[in-house]
Image (cartoon, rainbow, N blue to C red):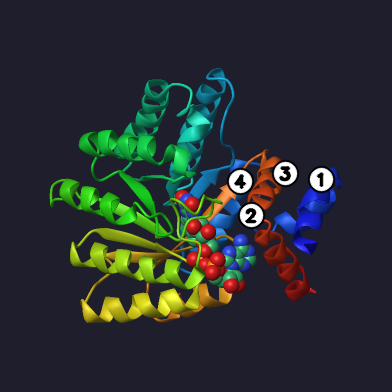
């Protein structure tokens, strides 16, 4: 109830006030801010994936501008000699308006990272996008297998069959690369698991499947029971850095991140930046009011 009230008043509060809550999770408005955070994380031995905030454009002409931001960002990281990968949301390239236009823009970005031996991760959005995003991945993977990856959400009922499909695409020459997460969108019960314990069981089953099939996994979670379970599987299958990395969101559970680094695991942090941070933060909160709790908790921790 309190979460819902906070979520409903947030959009009416001054931007500066909301920034007090959001700055822990967002590097800033510019590529320069993302570079600054990437340098800080590099100091502690953490890799980064950079995300330009934005989604669901209403007009295709906006997609070109988003692509230009990505191309410029890749150039800036290259010039700085800073290794990074890039995460993107296909809806911000017009996926649901014209999937061919979206494909052309994302292909240009993947071609660019191919030229500098880097990597693009296609984030997974809500269930209305899953088929189109898997298809986008399949087409790009055929062209640039080493430079593009996809995300799988453990909470979806369809996940085991999507994993089977990905395993069929996977080979030594055309390696598949998956980020495994729980899933952040509020989905109907008919297609997604709601019980948090059950989601964890499905997460571990998916992880086991990916490891058994020697598919590279970005294990994206801040849930200690999952990072512990993952470490057991890593030992059981004698896996190395070639097989997996842990991934976390910027500003979330830094202590757990440092523990995993100290235990010798590779870690990548998802670093968002962009002028749309205000709309992005308040929309995310509206979608999932539970997040308001995290934000408040973070404030008290800091205090
Ligand atoms: C690198 C990365 C990329 C992701 N990409 C996608 C994607 O493409 N598509 C998608 O649907 N989802 C994505 N997610 C989100 C993911 O699906 C989960 O919703 C999110 O990570 C929370 O789940 P959890 O596994 O951390 O477990 P939870 O049980 O939700 O969290 C475990 C603990 O972590 C802490 N915590 C978690 N989130 C926060 C937060 N925001 N602020 C403060 N504390 C927090 C809390 O202490 C909590 O108890 C991504 C997550 C990560 C880490």
Q: Earlier in the sequence, mark 2 or mark 4?
A: 4
Look at the picture and state if 69 lies above or below 175. Answer: above
Mark 3 closeness class: few <14, some 14–19, many ≥20 residues within 10 Å: some
- Name the residue rendered at 36%, 65% in the picture: 245
Discs 2, 1 touching: Cβ within 8 Å: no
Q: Is residue 253 visible?
A: no
Between discs 2 and 1, the one toward the N terminus: 1
| SS at circle 3 | helix
Q: Say few, some or many: other residues with alpha carbon within 10 Å of mark 4 (under 14 / 14 to 19 / 20 or more).
A: many
Label pair 3/1, CB-CB below 8 angstroms: yes
**Placement of 227 over or under 213, stated as above or below:** below
Cα–Cα span, label 2 and label 3: 16 Å
Q: Residue at x 41, y 52 (%)?
A: 83
Q: Earlier in the sequence, mark 2 or mark 3?
A: 3
SS type, badge 2: loop
Q: Is residue 255 visible?
A: yes
Relative to 259, is 118 on the left or the right?
Answer: left
Point out the residue furthest to the left here: 172
Q: Quadrant of the C terminus?
A: bottom right
Residue 248 at x, y percent in the picture:
50, 63
Distance from the alpha carbon under mark 1 to that under mark 4: 16 Å
Q: Whole-Å distance between the Cαs marked 3 and 4?
A: 11 Å
The percent position of residue 127, horizontal first and vertical second, equals: 46, 43
Helix, strand or loop for disc 1: helix
Q: Nearer the N terminus, badge 1 or badge 4?
A: 1
Secondary structure beneath label 4? strand
């Amino acid at each position: 109830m309190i979460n819902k009230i906070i979520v409903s008043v947030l959009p009416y509060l001054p931007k500066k006030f909301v920034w007090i809550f959001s700055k822990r999770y967002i590097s800033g408005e510019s590529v320069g801010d993302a570079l600054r955070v990437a340098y800080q994380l590099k100091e502690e031995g953490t890799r980064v994936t950079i995300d330009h905030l934005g989604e669901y454009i209403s007009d295709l002409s906006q997609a070109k501008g988003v692509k230009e931001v990505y191309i410029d960002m890749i150039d800036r990281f290259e010039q700085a000699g800073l290794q990074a990968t890039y995460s993107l949301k296909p809806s911000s390239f017009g996926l649901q308006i014209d999937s061919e236009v979206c494909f052309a823009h994302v292909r240009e970005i993947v071609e660019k990272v191919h030229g500098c031996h880097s990597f693009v991760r296609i984030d997974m959005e809500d269930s209305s996008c899953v088929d189109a995003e898997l298809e986008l991945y399949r087409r790009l993977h055929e062209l640039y297998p080493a430079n593009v990856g996809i995300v799988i959400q453990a909470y979806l009922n369809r996940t085991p069959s999507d994993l089977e499909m990905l395993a069929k695409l996977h080979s030594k020459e055309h390696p598949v690369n998956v980020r495994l997460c729980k899933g952040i969108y509020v989905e109907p019960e008919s297609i997604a698991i709601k019980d948090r314990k059950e989601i964890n069981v499905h997460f571990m089953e998916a992880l086991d499947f990916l490891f058994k099939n020697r598919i590279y996994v970005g294990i994206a979670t801040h849930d200690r029971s999952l990072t512990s379970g993952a470490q057991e599987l890593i030992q059981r299958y004698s896996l190395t850095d070639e097989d997996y990395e842990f991934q976390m969101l910027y500003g979330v559970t830094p202590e757990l991140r440092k523990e995993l680094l100290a235990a010798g695991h590779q870690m990548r942090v998802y670093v968002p930046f962009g002028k749309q941070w205000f709309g992005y933060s308040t929309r995310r909160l509206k979608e999932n009011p539970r997040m308001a709790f995290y934000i408040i908790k973070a404030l008290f921790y800091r205090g």
